[in-house]
């Protein structure tokens, strides 16, 4: 149920056409709530049908013109309701952790290279988040909106920091693990 709320949030930040929204989504909300462009366009249609958003009137009607959307009072009320509602954390599912657990019974062949690949991906993401922080959150802007957006980015930075540290530790331990006994022996 969170995708419509992510879209409402983005449109409240700035009314946008679908294509502009998907581009903005890829550069911000998409870091922690991913959606394909098709999902976003489908959801825009649903939100419009529910009376939560509307297409802004075009200055000059033209066939094939981009529709820009804005949030209606009902959409803001829905976002306020959802924001205030309690929600339990979701269980974490990660195939890499499951693969490590499986390696405990079948061996670690091939795992080191993928751990290194994951480490590289997390390091790159951490660098990107840190660059966003330097660029978009200079000292002195203490508005509530900026502080909350920065908290979300800080969560991303802390998660990537965790993964880079954990993967580094896993890679140091992997060579020291004893070989598994041969189940056929």
Image (cartoon, rainbow, N blue to C red):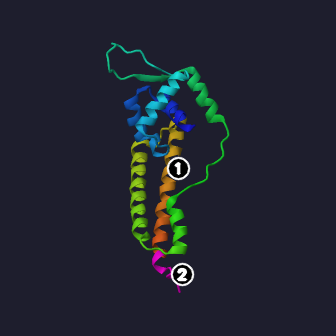
Mark 1 secondary-structure assignment: helix
Residue ID for mark 1: 155
Q: Is residue 60 left or right of residue 112?
A: left
Quadrant in which the N terminus is drawn: top right
Q: Is residue 17 left or right of residue 4?
A: left
Q: Nearer the viewer, residue 85 or 152?
A: 85
Q: Is residue 182 magenta?
A: yes
- Which residue lies at the image location 51% right of the left edge and 49% below the top edge? 154
Q: Quadrant of residue 61?
A: top left
Q: Residues within 10 Å of mark 1 (few under 14, many from 20)?
A: few
Q: Nearer the viewer, mark 2 or mark 1?
A: 2
Q: Is residue 153 magenta?
A: no
Please report the bounds of the magenta region as a residue range. 174-185
Residue 44 visible in the shown view: yes
Residue 177 percent location from the top left of the image: 50, 79
Residue 143 visible in the shown view: no
Q: Nearer the viewer, residue 79 or 185?
A: 185
On residue 141, the disc is none
Cα–Cα gap, marks 2 and 1: 43 Å
Residue 116 percent location from the top left of the image: 40, 66
Mark 2 secondary-structure assignment: loop
Residue ID for mark 2: 183
Number of residue marks:
2
């Amino acid at each position: 149920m969170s995708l419509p709320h992510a879209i409402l949030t983005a449109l409240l930040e700035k009314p946008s056409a679908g294509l502009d929204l998907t581009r903005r989504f890829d550069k911000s909300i998409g870091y922690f709530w991913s959606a394909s462009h098709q999902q976003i366009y489908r959801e825009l249609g649903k939100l419009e049908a529910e009376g939560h958003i509307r297409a802004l009137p075009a200055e000059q009607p033209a066939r094939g013109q981009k529709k820009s959307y804005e949030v209606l009072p009902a959409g803001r009320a829905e976002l306020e309701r959802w924001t205030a509602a309690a929600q339990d954390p979701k269980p974490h599912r990660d195939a890499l952790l499951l693969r490590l657990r499986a390696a405990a019974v079948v061996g670690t062949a091939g795992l080191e290279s993928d751990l290194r690949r994951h480490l590289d991906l997390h390091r790159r993401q951490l660098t990107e988040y840190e660059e966003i922080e330097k660029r978009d959150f200079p000292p002195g802007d203490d508005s509530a909106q900026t502080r909350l957006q920065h908290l979300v980015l800080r969560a991303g930075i802390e998660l990537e920091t965790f993964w880079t540290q954990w993967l580094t530790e896993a890679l140091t331990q992997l060579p020291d693990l004893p070989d598994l006994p041969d189940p056929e022996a």
